[in-house]
Image: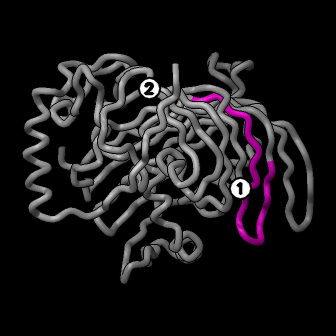
Amino acid sequence: MKTRYFPILALCLTASCDKAKNIAEQATSTVKESINKATGEGGGKVDPELRKLVDQTDEGVVFRKDLPFPARIDVNASTSSQMSIRLLQASAIERNSRMLSGVMDSKDKFERSGDHVRFTQGKISLTDPTALDSEDKPKVIDDNPLKTLMEIDAPREFRRREGMWRADEAGGFAAAAVAREIGPVFEVLLQEHGLAPRPQWFAKRRVKTADEIVLTGPALAMLVSGGATGTLKLKLESTGEVAGHPCGVFSVSGDYSRRKFPSFSGGFTDEDVTIQSGKVWLSMIHPLVLKWDIDTIQSFKTGDKGGQLIQGQGTSKITITREWRERGL
């Protein structure tokens, strides 16, 4: 099938009262056009209230960016990565190399209320799926060098004051130090984790099943935040849902690179990633990426300033799922 190149338009982040009224009227009018039930992938059912906002006809689906983005959001994110990676660890006093093989799982919670953001990190575990413990569960690997870079002791809170995101004073010195580093790029973190809309999204036109889209240059921000370079190819396979949220399910492949990408736990990462195959779930009603399920070849370098540095190269099968909720619904 011939690839169709869709223009990707920058998302306007503000709306007037009149526009908001028109949006509400448009949302009501599209109820008649919306899907009657979820089809495709996801395994669950689309939330009935969210289904009313879907604009889908026999001619395709509009991936909306016109609805006001909620100010109060909860996101429960789970990540599972089956990896086989050669690691090189370096610090001021030692340097060593090792293989890291296993399944690393983590869960995080993100909460936003306007200019207040709270990040709560759950348990991080690394297990060996080829070995069982005394309870016939995958054996836990205690020596996980990536955990030492990712793990934090307590929730971290950030507030925007005078246009700048800063750590809550109750977070102590460590949180304040992290905030100083990531404050200038905090909006990138919000976009990456579903707390703000993606700055690039689909044009206002219908996308049909089997339509292909090529993302490169600034359009990569539609999927990968942080000034990434490279090329990613999308193909709409079906419709589905993530925790009741209606999505288009796209196959995805290609390559991207990004430098100094921040994390809520502190530190920055350089990475080069080849997505060999996989799928990505994109919201039909907001500019959001809600799920990845991909096979990758990657190399990366991560660490904090003046501390331990870890470089890695290998393969990972990654699944990231974001259960996204507007608080109060």
- Residue 131's place in the image compared with 48, above or below, is above
Residue topped by disc 2: 211
Task: Tell me which numbered mark, 1 or 2, is placed earlier along the sequence.
Answer: 2
Q: CA distance from mark 1 to mark 2?
A: 32 Å
Magenta part of the protein: which range? Answer: 294-311
Q: Is residue 230 above or below residue 278?
A: below
Q: Secondary structure at mark 1?
A: strand
- Left or right: where 270 falls relative to 96: left
Q: Which residue is mark 1?
A: 270
Instruction: Inspect the magenta stretch and tell me whether residue 274 lies in it.
Output: no
Q: Main secondary structure of the magenta part?
A: strand
**10 Å crowding of disc 2: few (<14), some (14-19), many (20+):** some
Looking at the image, can residue 245 be seen?
Answer: no
Q: Quadrant of the C terminus?
A: top left
Q: Nearer the viewer, mark 1 or mark 2?
A: 2
Q: Is residue 154 left or right of residue 28?
A: right
Q: Residue at x 74, y 32 (%)?
A: 315
Q: Position of residue 322 (x, y in %)?
A: 42, 39
Q: Locate residue 235, reporting x and y percent.
A: 49, 27
Residue at the far front in the pictured view: 2
Query: What's under tag 2, amino acid-wise?
Result: Asp
Label 2, secondary structure: give it. Answer: loop
